[in-house]
Image: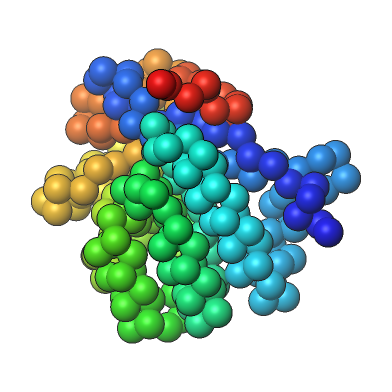
Amino acid sequence: MIYDLFSYKYQPIVDLKTLSIVRYEALLQADDTLEIEPLIRDLEREGQISELDLFSLESIVGVLNRRRSDVKIAVNISPISICCPYFQQEALSLIGMLNDPTSLSLEITERGKIRTPEAAKRLFSKLQRKGISLGLDDIGDGDATTDVVAEFCLDYLKLSSKLTIGIERSERKQKEVRKILAFAKERDLPVVAEHLEMLAQADWLTQAGCGLGQGWLYGKAEKLPPRQN
């Protein structure tokens, strides 16, 4: 089975002021025979991405239950899966098995539009009532925009690396990010800046009002730390 070739590593997301870890993002890994990004694109094109997303969700639910929710983890979900009735049903069933639903976040990826918005809103409402937080991945890339965050009442957003790399020296990127941060502040939404590798990036974003960061500056994707008793 192809999923036997997959595993996960976890990259910390930190508070940019205190540097404390607020949660981890689960990043899909594969052995040397597979490349993740082309595989995901193929599965989305063939309409089979929901199976991978359910595998991911089941895996992370298992991790959280074994850890007794001493960590919080975010996992990526394709907008194609969000629109799939089978995924919706199975995802709610899996989440019903979580000991602590507040330990899980779902990040909607930028690859495509949510084609059935009313069905998605019903699903999101059910998830949020259970305590799941919902984010939009890679704002500034693909179909990820603040309009999507507003339309679907999402709980947080993430700035794409296309905006954060070199932001300390790009007036264009700074202007765009300030608009996004103003949008988030008005709605009291946390913002995560991805792909932070330089202190200059983190300093500019912190001063601009971005609260959370992720990238090699704070830790590479690795195994989860040992469970705290």
Q: Position of residue 15 (x, y in %)?
A: 30, 26
Residue depicted at 29% across the width and 61% down the height: 130
Residue depicted at 63% across the width and 40% down the height: 8
The answer to whether 188 appears left or right of 24 in the picture is left
Query: Where is 16 relative to 159, above or below?
Result: above
The answer to whether 168 appears left or right of 196 in the picture is left
Q: Position of residue 59 (x, y in %)?
A: 59, 50
Foreground residue, 5 or 191?
A: 5
Query: Where is 187 relative to 121, above or below?
Result: above
Residue depicted at 35% across the width and 52% down the height: 101
The answer to whether 101 appears left or right of 109 in the picture is left
Residue 21 visible, this orientation? yes
Residue depicted at 21% across the width and 48% down the height: 189
Residue 84 visible, this orientation? no
The answer to whether 2 appears left or right of 46 in the picture is right
The color scheme shown is rainbow
Check the image and name the residue furthest to the right: 33
